[in-house]
Amino acid sequence: MLDRDGPVPLYVQVADVIHRRIDSGQLRTGEPVPSEAALEAEFDIARSTARNVARELRRRRLVHTVRGEGTFVGPAGVPRAKPTRAKYAIIADDLAARIRRGELRPNRAIPSEQVLMRQYGVAKVTARLAVSRLREQRWVVTVPHRGTCVCDPARWPVNP
């Protein structure tokens, strides 16, 4: 894409897409803007480019960022959309269902954090929390330097 001043930076092009989604009502006031990880996955961009997208949207006064929570449509102080369940819990529940169905088998590795990040469009900390939840529920066990594997069915939770 070119304008009269030369090529338009990639982060501006992606910010334009998000801007159009806001204008069209696809993203409404109070709703979260896609995370850096989601932007990386959708647009095949680097994390620094995704970070610049949020910066550009803030410069345009379309969004605001709440430290530790994310970036939301609208100015600071507007009521945010009621959050659904935490993403890490949704991911953990999905993986537990796959274990129960036999898609992920005992003594075999579950998808790595990197794979979970790509599959679900989440940040590393979210993928890590999902695996931690599975560990707490005794669906999986993590062996240092080996990875995380599905536990023996005898150790699985009784009432999942």
Image (cartoon, grey):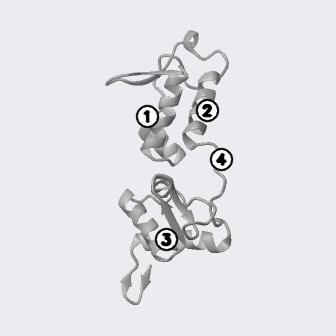
Sequence-wise, which precedes: disc 3 or disc 2? 3
Q: Closest to the observer: 140 or 118?
A: 140
Tag 2–tag 4 contact (CB < 8 Å): no
Q: Amino acid at mark 3?
A: Ala
The residue nearer to you, when weighing 145 against 29, is 29
Residue that numbered label 1 is attached to: 112
- At a point 39% along the width and 74% down the height, the residue shown is 9
Disc 2 marks which amino acid? Asp
Q: Which residue is mark 3?
A: 15
Q: Which residue is mark 4?
A: 84
- The residue shown at (48%, 69%) is 14
Residue on which the image places disc 2: 93
**Amino acid on which the number 4 mark rests in the picture:** Thr
Which part of the image, by quadrant, shows the C terminus? top right
Q: Secondary structure at mark 3?
A: helix
Which of marks 4 and 2 precedes in the sequence? 4
Amino acid identity at mark 1: Ser
Q: CA distance from mark 3 to mark 2?
A: 32 Å
Marks 2, 4: nearer the viewer: 4
